[in-house]
Amino acid sequence: MQIAVLYGTETGNAEMLAEDIADHLSDHVVTVTNLADFAPSEFDPRTLYLIVTSTYGDGELPASAQPFGAAMAAGAPDLTGIQFAVFGLGDSEYPETFNFGGKRLEEMMVAAGATLLGERVTHDASGDDMADDLAYPWAEAVVALAEPALA
Amino acid sequence: MPSVAIFGAGPSGCYVAQALAKARPDADITIFDALPVPYGLVRYGVAADHQGTKGVIRQFERLFERQGIGFQGHVTLGRDVTLDAVRAAYDAVVLATGLSRDRRLGIPGEDLVGVHGSGAVTRAWNGFPGAEAPRMGRRVVVIGNGNVAIDLVRLLAKGASELHGSDILIEPGAGVQDITIVGRSPAEVAKFDPVMLKELARLEGCAITVSDLTGEGKVIEALDSLHGHAPAGSTKRLCFRFGLVPDRILGTERVEGVAFADGTVIAADTVLTAIGFDGEPGWSASDDGLLAPGLYAAGWVRRGPRGTIPENRTDAQAIAARIAADLPEGPGKPGLVMPGATDYAGWQRIDAAERAAAPEGRVRAKITDHARMLTLARQTGER
Ligand SMILES: Cc1cc2nc3c(=O)[nH]c(=O)nc-3n(C[C@H](O)[C@H](O)[C@H](O)COP(=O)(O)OP(=O)(O)OC[C@H]3O[C@@H](n4cnc5c(N)ncnc54)[C@H](O)[C@@H]3O)c2cc1C
Ligand SMILES: Cc1cc2nc3c(=O)[nH]c(=O)nc-3n(C[C@H](O)[C@H](O)[C@H](O)COP(=O)(O)O)c2cc1C
């Protein structure tokens, strides 16, 4: 399967996780791209998109995902037929906006017609879980869900 | 293999190593630090109750645990080894030693007993080796309008139960009743991150008032919504004041208060200054961090002591790109093994001992005795 891991980050946690996920899925053809270098017009229906993003400010997207978020808000192309899933990184020290970055991207994608596979999973920087331990089962499950359409 | 020495294992040094290891997997990279423990201000600056922010350490651990980057601790550049000797032994040398001396107010009374700089205080609260936490009086004035000032205020305002999940062993605000945070400028231009202000709305035992509020913007909105925060049974009070230019710190031996240019006087038993950091790097670097052929600077020591961890990451990545382009191919200079240096396994022993000693509700108990750190770092497993 062709898989693209897209990440949004400020301090690099999401980037490291994106690379780990790609390594973990090495049976597939996987690319890892910073959302800063990705435009909504590049989505391709033959690819599964795994979006990994943190949250900043008051529940905003991290800096590297902001141009993408702005482009989506300014009028995303029709993403019907695009399959994606979201893994969010956040911190429960910010309870009111916990993992809003991932939530925002999910909402934008769905509003543009893309299909969400599985449920958005969240990591808590103040919790005990390692992000990898949550992300690998999530990624495997999402790949299994995409199998019928994209394998 | 071309060799690279990075001095300073704070975020800047670690991010340079991370980006450089990616761009030049052929490079042999070693990070040196003055302490036997890495991570700089992530460990000793970032507040003890912001463990999530300290989570970047997971990325840095990987440098040493999987990416083959060396760590030599307890090596101070300029004391244990000269820059010339390092440059002779490495193809590239990166200075990422930070700049965190407290900037002084420059007004009379600053040296009275009971006046402390934010760097000294936050180091002590973060368990920096040998740093003793100053005793706080009942009335504390915090001078400064940045995020470090908010860190101070928040930790002073928290009760013991609110420090759950942190790695601070003392209760910084024990005995504190009145906290006043003052800025010389109007509220509108305060350098607070609005998110840091909003966090104060979760204080459980501290009532908040905000005076002198003028203008508009996100900071004003955040301050405005803090005003009147009054949890039942509050034992502490926090007051924000703006537009007060400190003129003199009052007192004969101990601090008794702060006098401001407009004649306002605020009584205080303790005064904390949080007006930034300074220090002289002793050199100047070009925009891409180059000081001389093969010599680079990154992070606070290059740009001045301002900016957050993400800004240092961006800076470090740019400098790493420059180094990657400059670094020769093929065999390089031999590097240095400093006698008496501690290694990463030594830090792992300190880390394990700190975690094992964590009391209920704390994630670690930092070792604050430098000699004990060294002993642990040098233990070799068998006894
Ligand atoms: C109190 C405080 C709270 C902060 N809170 C936050 C926050 O919540 N979020 C955020 O994003 N940013 C925060 N910051 C800012 C952040 O800490 C800095 O941006 C960052 O640490 C600067 O990184 P650096 O690597 O340049 O310097 P440092 O982190 O200072 O690292 C320098 C390293 O060099 C070592 N060193 C110094 N001299 C020598 C020498 N001669 N030889 C060998 N080694 C040496 C030191 O031991 C240290 O490990 C805070 C800063 C402070 C002071
Ligand atoms: C200033 C600041 C604001 C943050 N705001 C939020 C937030 O509103 N919600 C949240 O869930 N996490 C928030 N976080 C936590 C980060 O999303 C979390 O630390 C994440 O692991 C960072 O990943 P990154 O390194 O990929 O940027 C914030 C962190 C910082 C430093």
Image (cartoon, coloured by chain):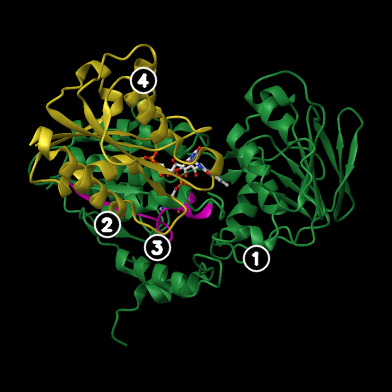
Q: Are marks 4 and 3 in contact (CB under 8 Å)?
A: no
Give the crowd class for mark 4: few <14, some 14-19, many >=20 residues within 10 Å.
some
Marked residue nearer the N-terminal end (3 or 1)? 3
Q: Hue of chain B?
A: green
| Among numbered discs 2 and 3, the one appearing first in the sequence | 2
- Determine the residue positioned at 41% across, 67% down: B351
Q: Which mark is residue A67?
A: 4
- Structural distance between the alpha carbons of marks 2 and 3: 16 Å
Observer-side mark, 1 or 4, equals 4
Instruction: Give the percent coordinates (x, y) of residue A39.
Output: 26, 19
- Mark 3 against mark 1, which lies toward the viewer? 1
The circle on residue B58 is none
- Write down which chain is painted yellow: A
Judge left or right: residue A82 versus residue B250: left
Magenta region, residue range = B27-44
Which residue bears the numbered disc 1?
B170
Q: Please report, as a chain letter, where disc 3 is located.
A: B
- The residue sitting at 35% across, 11% down in the picture is A75
